[in-house]
Amino acid sequence: MHTFNSQHRANLSRPVLISLLLCLLSPVIQAATAQTDNNHASWTENRSLEAADTGLIYSLPVVNQKQLASEIDTLNQQLKQRQENLSQVIEKNHFTATDALIIAALPGGILYAAVKKQRVLQAEEELDKVTSQLASLAEFRTTNQNPLQPAMIASR
């Protein structure tokens, strides 16, 4: 009769453990593969291939042009509204004769003037940003005469 020593038991159990491990992990591997396939399909579904003058081919996402134009128009309206609001804040916070009396008469008048001046400065800074954003949107609209024209795909 043949007896097994500890080395034979380790050799027998290693293939069994590997088989068991593969059986347990196969559903996980299949799920990960399916997820990768789904991600790849959705990624390629929303992309187009473009070729540069150098021959380099690159991938661009497909853009819903009507939605983009709508979002640009909405942004333009929001920026115009913000510009009007900031202009009103600036006009409302300019110093008047009443402010001069408050500054001179009240002990906290200097603090009042500093807060009011800070509001005006912040509103002016933000108004400059909004104005530059509106200018860039207007520039975008004038440079692209037909922004909804579909992109051309070059092939070699």
Image (spheres, rainbow, N blue to C red):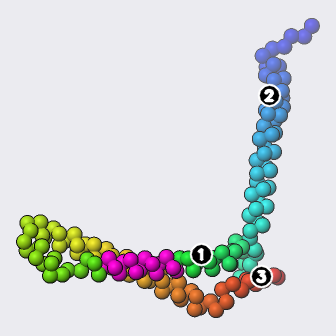
Q: Nearer the viewer, mark 2 or mark 3?
A: 3
Tell me which numbered mark, 2 or 1, is placed earlier along the sequence. 2
- The span from disc 2 to disc 1 (Cα, nearest Å) is 58 Å
Displayed quadrant of residue 146: bottom right
Tell me which numbered mark, 2 or 3, is placed earlier along the sequence. 2
Query: Residue under circle 1?
Result: 71
Callout 1: SS: helix
Looking at the rendered image, the quarter that the N terminus falls into is: top right
Task: Return the residue nearer the eye: 91 or 58.
Answer: 91
Q: Is residue 123 above or below residue 111?
A: below
Query: Residue under circle 3?
Result: 153
Q: Residues within 10 Å of mark 1 (few under 14, many from 20)?
A: few
Residue at image location 78% in from the left, 45% down from the top: 31
Tell me which numbered mark, 3 or 1, is placed earlier along the sequence. 1
Magenta region, residue range: 76-90
Residue at image location 79% in from the left, 33% down from the top: 24
Q: Position of residue 61 (x, y in %)?
A: 70, 71
Inspect the image, locate mark 1, and give the three-letter code of the amino acid beneath it: Glu
Query: Residue under circle 2?
Result: 17
Q: Position of residue 137 (x, y in %)?
A: 53, 84
Q: Looking at the image, which residue sits at the far right? A: 1
